[in-house]
Amino acid sequence: MTEDEVRQQAFAMPIHNPAFPPGPYRFVDREYLIITYRTDPEALARLVPAPLKLAEPVVKYEFINMPDSTGFGHYCESGQVIPVTLGGEAGGFVLSMYLDDHPPIAAGRELWGFPKKLGHPELRVHADTLMGTLDYSDFRVATGTMGFKHRAIDRDQARAALGAPTFLLKIIPHVDGTPRICELVRYTLTEIEVKGAWTGPGALDLRDHALAPVADLPVLEVLSTVHILADLTLPLGTVAHDYLAR
């Protein structure tokens, strides 16, 4: 393999058999349980990196089931998103994500900077309850529940929420351990088709864990709970801020 061939073929590792295909990535029947809760504003402020600004002291805790996704197959995901602004634009900062499939872990971290770690989330209907759970190292760290499809909500409202900008802190180290890339990445979901959206009574229980510290942002009050089923596309991102630029 010549140097030119390396440059032409380089996309992801390993070069001869990448862990994931090139994007964008289409998701069919992506299912969300999103529980929005009020939390400790001081704890929240310590976790939001400048130049992002904290919009309000709330967290969106998400459980997501993805049964049909380009190159990734079927996997589940769970994590926390914080409402923020950047230059006056409102969006969400992804603080943590735990999922059970290697290709989206590798792609998420390498391409966009999603803060992904291996965990064992699940989203399913249990009798009359939509239930999301997250286990880390065989320990239950999160349980979210919602009354199943109690009341339909406006699909345009759900589509707008899914289409809001998302910000990620992408960090890739140099071989000496110093940051080679350190930047805020921005992306927005596209081609969103909401197939259904509902609300109902909800609850969220978070447990302390040293390596999955979702409970560091404690649940003070559950504000809303939504269940969304949608098809959508995850495009590639753009650099919103470069921390290493001089």
Image (cartoon, grey):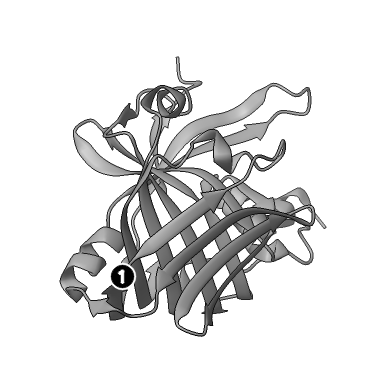
Residue 38 at x, y = what percent? Answer: 35, 40
Is residue 11 visible in the rendered image? The answer is no
Q: Is residue 175 left or right of residue 57?
A: right
Residue 69 at x, y = what percent? Answer: 54, 76
The amino acid at mark 1 is: Gly
Q: Is residue 30 above or below residue 2?
A: below
Look at the image and tell me in which quarter the C terminus lies. Answer: top left
Q: Kindly indicate the quadrant of the structure image that contains residue 82.
A: top left
* Depth check, front residue: 190 or 227: 227
Task: Tell me what residue is drawn at x 34 percent, y 29 percent.
Answer: 52
Number of numbered markers: 1
Residue at which label 1 appears: 200
- Assess disc 1: are there few (<14), some (14-19) or many (≥20) residues with their C-alpha within 10 Å of its C-alpha: some
Q: Is residue 224 left or right of residue 22?
A: left
Secondary structure type for disc 1: loop
Task: Tell me what residue is drawn at x 18 percent, y 66 percent.
Answer: 157
Q: Is residue 140 above or below residue 122?
A: above
Q: Is residue 157 left or right of residue 7?
A: left
Residue 73 at x, y = what percent? Answer: 63, 78
Task: Tell me what residue is drawn at x 63 percent, y 59 percent.
Answer: 134
Look at the image and tell me in which quarter the N terminus lies. Answer: bottom right
Is residue 182 visible in the rendered image? The answer is yes
| Furthest residue toward top | 246
